Amino acid sequence: MCDQYLLAYHKNELYDILNSKNDSHHFSININFIVLFDNDPSLGNKVLKEADNLLGELDEGAQKAQKILISDLLDNGTEASFKNNVHCRIYGLPICPELHRNLFPKNYDANKFLQVSGTVVRISATKLLEFKREYICSKCKYKIISYAEYEKKNIISPPKKCLNPDGNCNSTNLISSDELKSQFCKDYQEIKIQEQVSQLGFGTMPSSMWVSLEDDLVDSCKPGDNVTICGIVKRRWSPFSPGRIFDIELAIKANHIQINNTCGLPNLVTPEIKELFSQFWDTYKNIPILGRDIILKSFCPQIFGLHIVKLAIAVVLAGGSAANQDSSTGVKTRSEPHLLLVGDPGTGKSQLLRFASKVVPRSVLTTGVGSTAAGLTVTAMMEDGEWQLEGGALVLADGGICCIDEFNSMKEHDRTSIHEAMEQQTISVAKASIVCKLSTRCSILAATNPKGNIDPMQPLCMNLALATPLLSRFDLILLIRDTVQEEWDSLVADYILTETKDNDSKFTKSQEWSLEMLQAYFTIIKKIHPPLTEEANRILASYYQLQRRQSSRNKSRTTVRLLDSLVRLSQGHARLLFHESVQIIDAVMAVILVEIGMGYQEDSILNLDMNIHSSFPDDSINSYVELLNNVLEKLNLHDILEQEINSLHSEIDSLNCGNEITTKSRYFQSMKNKEPTSNRDSNIIERDDNKHEEDKETLHNSEMERSIFQDDNSIDNLDLNI
């Protein structure tokens, strides 16, 4: 029955296995359980009730199916060879409480075939497992095969007497061969998985469970991976000895393993949700700034205002794109930005971090008080006389975000240990003779309190008691001050006491996105890889060069990392607005975020008059145009400014949105007809052909800033005129 099913639905896979030239390799035939149950309900029921027997029958059926097909291939003159190591793997059990578990199985689930999801926290070294042994009767020379018992932790029990059916030997003198045969051994590894914290209730300790991997499943995952395992739940125990506690544990004998690091929340991303987002951006495609503000107002709605902070968190969660990087050299620039929130007590930092950890499916939330270097990176633990690696918070957050509250409470040594994880996004391990590298491709959202009162005359590292190398790794550092403002305090008090959500501008609660919608949206936009346009390149390069030319620049913040941060933030903003490429608005908002982060001292060069405590603007379009004019005027990019103003003007006029948009269009008309100011060089507006060619050469040079700006002295000799 099993071989007929494999021939009917997996013939192509069998042909590929027969045509393979590696006879010693282990091959897998992946069988979808739903397809199996629909086409052969008897086999499907047997998987659930007698999984041990059926999996053995499926492997034997694969051998029989090979013998049937190999004759046809040899008759046709095709080279083919019979493979002994073929395993049938069953996956895709229906999502129901009886078969699919987010919480780990208990005692009543023993001997059931289940699908379990979890996070790998520890892996053991790869071992060689002797799964059967040959014994020979010293009297009649009859050979007996004894198999390892999984329930007794793979101990092989010798037969008590001769089992020769031809005669009454009954000898008890059985001898095993001293030679270890390769066909009696297989690769073996154990991993420890932990329940996903997002699936647990508040205050619940996550459970852990050992999973055994065999043959081609070995080394298929690493610490920090989110996995879905299909296998048989087994009880197992150590050999019994008098006077010792009889310890029994539950373990899973894996049959199939799937890595889910980049899947996000596939259950939430339905075609209906995708269509809903498409309709949303069709409505706001000409004025995306309004659609963006609706998304931002759904971020942590219990906190009033903090428009800039919520925008920064949303951009960091969206992240940059690594698809357009050249990996031919083997060195990649990280695409995940980092954010540090510095604020007085009671400014809502912890609430923002907790909400951000809920939006991204793969997240770890910890505090500086309860974190050490080993807890953040990786630790080596000894169990049963063997060293095993156990991943920390950054390893478990690979592919997501790691939120660290009370960042200043960590010890200096512990903070230094995450330097490599933040920039190179790897953790190099050299512990207990284990030398390896683990990935930490995650964004870090950290929150800290200042050291006493903020002194604007002192550098940021002195006010925070954090080292400069660590601060330079953060793309954004936002300072939230608890200042006394009568109007602001009145708004906050009304918002908290009346519990109204429409105090921010003209936003109604019906427009607010739910947490599930935000989770689905950020899962979808992670698949967008926006490249930089020519206008975005000019804006970012001009701002970077302007920062480098300042005589009073902060050398720890204006390194090449500043340019990388601008690229990451602009790509994150493009993702947030569902853009296929980084447009002018994305590059301008990246410059604004970095400029606000540098506004702590005199590092700000654009002098943007923006308050981090500000609520959402009543007129988002006019607010953006004012910022656009301020930024591009000071960067001397007047052609891009006029292009963007004309584009916005035509888009607003093309909409039939009532008197409000008409009022806005008057502002655009005034901007369009605005005469050049007295301090603007008229040669910039009316360029001749020679000047235009000179600008092109300057832009070409700006693309080589990575090699030019490595030497601080060379920047002073450049004549950059953009």
Image: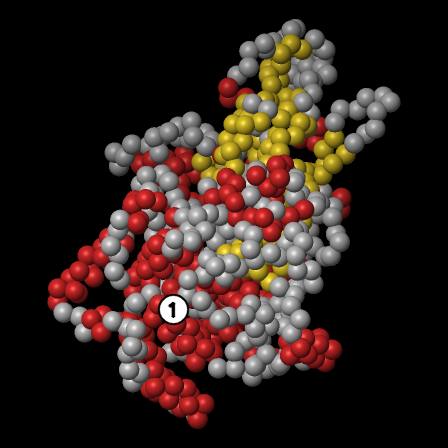
Q: Position of residue 334 (x, y in %)?
A: 43, 47
Q: Nearer the viewer, residue 129 or 203?
A: 203
Rendered position, 259 above or below 316: above
Q: Position of residue 72 (x, y in %)?
A: 32, 37
Q: Nearer the viewer, residue 710 or 420?
A: 710
Q: How is the image coloured?
A: secondary structure
Rendered position, 605 above or below 87: below
Taking the view exactly as shown, the residue that stands out farthest to the top is: 139
Q: Which residue is mark 1?
A: 631
Q: What residue lies at 35% left-to-right and 54% top-to-bottom?
A: 549
- Residue 420 relative to residue 17: left or right: right
Q: What residue lies at 50% left-to-right and 43% top-to-bottom?
A: 469
Q: Quadrant of residue 253?
A: top right
Q: Which element type, helix, strand or loop, lies under badge 1?
A: helix
The reply to whether residue 296 is visible in this rendering is yes
Q: Nearer the viewer, residue 254 or 444?
A: 444
Q: Position of residue 693 (x, y in %)?
A: 15, 62
- Residue 169 relative to residue 184: left or right: right
Q: What residue lies at 34% left-to-right and 82% top-to-bottom?
A: 671
Rendered position, 393 above or below 320: above
The reply to whether residue 421 is visible in this rendering is no
Q: Indicate the amino acid at tag 1.
A: Val
Q: Position of residue 597 (x, y in %)?
A: 50, 60
Q: What residue lies at 42% left-to-right and 53% top-to-bottom?
A: 553
Rendered position, 690 above or below 35: below
Dividing the image into 4 quarters, which one contains the C terminus? bottom left
